[in-house]
Image (cartoon, coloured by chain):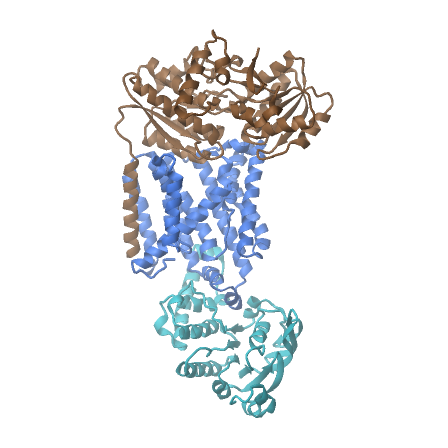
Chain colours: A brown, B cyan, C blue
Amino acid sequence: MRKSTLLKSLAAAAVAIGTSFSALAADPIKIGSVLSVTGPAAFLGDPELKTLQLYVESINKAGGVLGRQLQLVHYDDGSDAGKANGFAKRLIDDDKVDIIVGGTTTGSTMSMAPLVEKAEIPFISLAGAVVIVEPVKKWIFKTPHTDRMAAEKVFEDMKKRGLTKVALLSETSGFGASGKKETEGMAGKMGITLVANETYGPKDTDMTPQLTKIKNAAGVQAVFVFGLGQGPAVVNKNYKQLGITLPLYHAHGVASEEFIKLSGPAGEGVRLPAAALLVAEKLAANDPQKPVATGYRKAYNDRYKEDVSTFGGHAYDGLMIAVDAFKRAGGTEKAKVRDAIEATKGYIGTGGRVNMSPTDHMGLDLSAFRMLEIKNGDWALIN
Amino acid sequence: MALLEVENLSIAFGGVKAVQNVSFAVDPGIVYSVIGPNGAGKTTLFNLITGVYTPSEGEIRLDGQSIAGTAPHELALRGMARTFQNLQICMNMSALENVMVGAHLQLDRNLIKAMLRFPALARRDDQLRDEARGLMRFVGLDAYCNLGANSMPYGALKRLEIARALAAKPRILFLDEPAAGLNSKETAEIDELVQKVAESGITVVLVEHDMKMVMNISDRILVLDYGKKLTEGTAQEVRENPDVIAAYLGSTV
Amino acid sequence: MKMISRHKPLLILAGVLLLLPLVLPNNFYYDIAIRMAINAIIVLGLNLLIGFAGQISLGHAGFVGIGAYASAILPTHFGWHPLLAMTAGAAVASVIAAIVARPIFRLKGHYLAMATLGLGIIIAIVIKNEATYTGGPDGMAVPALGIGGFTINGEKQWYWVLAGLLLFSFWASKNLIDSPFGRALRALHGSEVASQVMGVDIVRYKVAIFILSAFFASLMGSVTAHYIGFVTPNIADFFHSIELVTMVVVGGMASIYGSLIGAVLLTALPQALSTFEGWETVVFGSILIFCMIFMPRGLVPTLAERFGGRGEDK
């Protein structure tokens, strides 16, 4: 008998908690977001969230969009793609958002993808992998450059220098594994021969064995490292310790000031492809990206007192593309907004010039990447 | 033929020989007691016979078949049951369920049938519940049937151990100090209960400190001292044995 | 009459499940209810192992992962029927459980915890590394669960499927606990030596219940995969294992309905706390600490006792 009262009161409590979830009237434009603000992908999700909060605030101060305020509804998936799926349902069914910007990792994006497709709601992902937009999914777009583009940009630069025999060293993380696959594919297309193909774990602290193998690989002319976080900086140090003098390239995942600091003197001469954002001040005065990049950089720096990262830039681009689409669609009707996003042309963002089309839901080409080199402890543009 | 035969049984823990060269035989249907001062090896002897320990040397035979080193749950199959000096009651279960566990081997223990509650299994369980109540009554615990074992007093738990052992329908029952820690009235009741059990045809092997009780109900008595057999015989013989008197250092036997 | 009284909590649960859709405002709440049910069934199996048999497993998410990935990989790469894949996953989980159980259950206490922990981590690593089949850390899509031309589709249909599974699981668990098998299981928790002497082959029972809970976990892994339509290695990782054990402990060890309450609360809590903006982990942790200090035996047993019940609902 008592157990039944217990159950009843628990059910009542559950309903009470439930009603408090419910959202307010749908007057503002609701921008939903699921980001990995905590957990292993926090270094991506944290600047993304900060950027969204910063710009939703400043857009609202300036009068909002179409005379309506923006309302950001965000959830932290803790870098767990399974949770992202649940939060996406909440955004769609409970918060009834008008658009979703976010999905920090490829995993969370893909776990949300079937839901947004079914619910027919525009979705701009901030994650990297090609699978998000290839094959094209009607309601899904993304802002970051793909790992395939990074490989292409690097190989392009190598070929300019006459380097065709390359050793690949990739991390066994999701980012590295996907990069490895795309690099292998791109090598064939671009006439590059992979003479060595090594991997390391995301938490490894010594890559000497892999680099020794690479050093001894027959005919090797350059080395390409595909990783995130600390690993690539360790590679730089080991590289110098082993006295390897071959040109060393990294992927776009380590494009941050932090990477230079971690590498120290060992970073000198290392090249990588990155968005213009990283070298905003060094861009030519007539570069169309200069105002956007410096503007975002300054706003972010002023507010948070920390360096910008390209990841926050992806969120900036996602939000701005969405806002632009709302304006052109003249409202929040989902099909119209989707069409407007797909029709985005010549939008200049932190990531590059975006030209979407029914067959391209990312809209970036290779010009979005700049080839950078570390010189005297700072980034230098290579033309 | 003797029901239980023990021959030259020994066990050593490290360098300590807890039981040394002990031999005896228990005929069916009697009450056989093992006595001796504290640390004489009585409980160790029980643990050896009931399979909790494996002997270092020697032989144990039940119905003429060797059982030394056999696992306890296999000995249960052969009709052996016991109680424990330091209570081994399942405090996470009700008193009645403790008794029902005793009947474990007589039941259908299939997992799938249990989950789907096959009617035959459910019927047998209901029947067992009644039998278990009967056993609770037999040991004088009717009042505790519906209680959790953890809310029963010490004296009642001692009897619960006996009820659980009886549920196994054993041929030979080992009781390890059933009266330890009980007052004289409770001891007298246990005394009576053990006799009732013996009268029902179950062979009883008893370890007990209460000499009055031992002398009163035992058909034969084995005396251990420092792990060795001191003597064996009827109550009368043991009482008059000078070695026994010496071992107990003048305590009235 | 007797049957009704034996299963009174189950009937109440059935009533709640039947009426719940009347108060669920939208699919999101159905989603939460479905996740609660999935967790409750896994936790129930785990509670049979931890609470009733007294054996710890810190690697149970590994079995959930096996089921989830069997349902993702076998139909996608090999064209198996989802039901067959689900069965195969559960079979593989059971076989792995059976193989490791015997050596594992020779261990006790910390060693057992470490061994199961290791097992879970190994499964998670394999899933992460075999990217050709599993999609690696980014995960992979799972086809819908269709049975004879009918495809389970949408939260409302899944809700009724899970409601049915939940009721069946509680009914079967309650039956198990009250059977000779269940009593032997609880007895070996209460006293290993006494249960052995009563004829219980304790290793056999520990192994059997470990397999059963792995089987439950794998099946629900498959259900999760089909329901969400996407799996990532997180489903098999250590934190998920800990989450499951926490549900057992908070709800109440050796309490069937504690499993339900633990799963319901710990599934709802992160959602309810998501408005705390970065403080949710702190609040979540505080609630757990509070529970453990003031209700160390878990919610259901503690409350049942406080409100004068018999202390244990089993």
Q: Is residue C8 visible?
A: yes
> As drawn, is A93 to the left or to the right of B27?
left
Image point (31%, 58%), residue name: C306
| Residue C14, x across and y down, in percent | 33, 48
Q: From this view, report whether residue B55 is shown above or below residue C150.
A: below
Q: Is residue A226 visible?
A: no
Image point (50%, 77%), residue name: B175
Image quadrant where residue A201 sits: top right
Q: From this view, report whether residue C214 is shown above or below residue C136.
A: below
> As drawn, is C33 to the left or to the right of A111?
left
| Residue A120, x across and y down, in percent | 37, 24
Image point (39%, 18%), residue name: A320
Q: Quadrant of the N terminus of chain C?
A: bottom left
| Residue A26, x across and y down, in percent | 27, 26
Image quadrant where residue C52 sits: bottom left
Q: Quadrant of the C terminus of chain C?
A: bottom left
| Residue A121, x across and y down, in percent | 37, 24
> How many discs mark residues in the rendered view?
0
> As drawn, is A356 to the left or to the right of C133?
left
Q: From this view, report whether residue A207 is shown above or below residue A133.
A: below
- Residues A75 and A122: in front is A75
- Residues C128 and C4: in front is C128
Q: From this view, report whether residue B181 is shown above or below residue A90.
A: below
